[in-house]
Image (tube, rainbow, N blue to C red):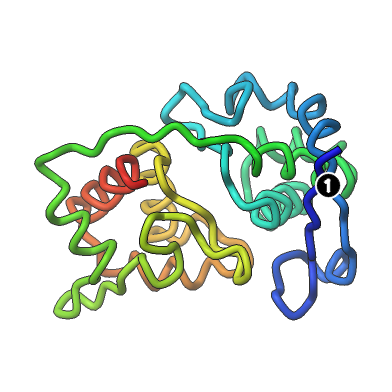
Amino acid sequence: MKRLLLATAATLGILSSAHADVFVDGDVEAGKTKAAACAACHGADGNSVVSANPKLAGQNAKYVVAQLQYFKTGERDNAIMKGMAAGLSDQDMADIAAFYATQKPKIGAADETLVHRGEQIYRGGDKEASIPACIGCHGPQGEGNPGSNYPALAGQHTDYVRGQLYAYRKEQRVNPKADIMMGVTRYMSDKDIDAVASYIEGLH
């Protein structure tokens, strides 16, 4: 039975202190069963068909566990997800995360009129506007950085990414490490956010 080792070490600061020293062994098959409750919003294989809901397929497992912990403790505010996470144990979270990590994300398509600006910001940032490049944390192909617990972005819905970037800019998404993204989005215009979000949907 395929398993993924999820290290929740305090040195990475990826979970709340109560779980910082726990190593959880996620079971993919068990996660598939447990993730059935998530399918209505995120799709049976983690590829949500509703653009406002994130795709979870291919997402690094540590990141999913961390977000579920944040929802459960209220460190990340979302009424629906708080309710969904409330009854999950650490093992449940690890199993669900392991399942989604093994699924293949379906890549969308970027708006051709926004690709140039989106690629410029994603790969090189905008020095004059004080906007850092996304590639440093999220990788050249949007694969993320599991070691630092930065999420994979490739193929993510434009609408979802746009909504999250707006939330960071307005300082409405507040949880550990949120200050990094608040700084990134501070000087992004609405057009910049639209371009980056669209570019990410077509990134692979």
* Image spot of residue 76 (x, y percent): 64, 53
Q: Nearer the viewer, residue 96 or 71?
A: 96
Front residue of 104/34: it is 104
Q: Amino acid at mark 1?
A: Gly
Q: Position of residue 24 (x, y in %)?
A: 87, 56
Horizontal side of residue 121 vs 65, given as left or right: left
In which quadrant of the rendered image does the N terminus lie? top right
Local packing at callout 1 (Cα closer than 10 Å; few below 14, some 14-19, many 20+) is many
SS for callout 1: strand
Q: Residue at x 36, y 36 (%)?
A: 159
Could you tell whether 59 is left or right of 167 in the image? Answer: right
Where does the image place residue 177, in percent across and percent down from the top left?
Answer: 57, 69
Residue 152: x %, y % from top left: 50, 53
What residue is rendered at 24% in x and 39% in y? 110
Q: Residue at x 24, y 78 (%)?
A: 130
- Front-most of residues 183 and 116: 116
Q: Is residue 151 left or right of residue 1?
A: left
Look at 33% across and 47% down and name the residue there: 203
Residue lying farthest front?
Answer: 1
Residue corresponding to mark 1:
26
Image position of 45 with respect to 12: above or below: above
Q: Is residue 101 above or below residue 50?
A: below
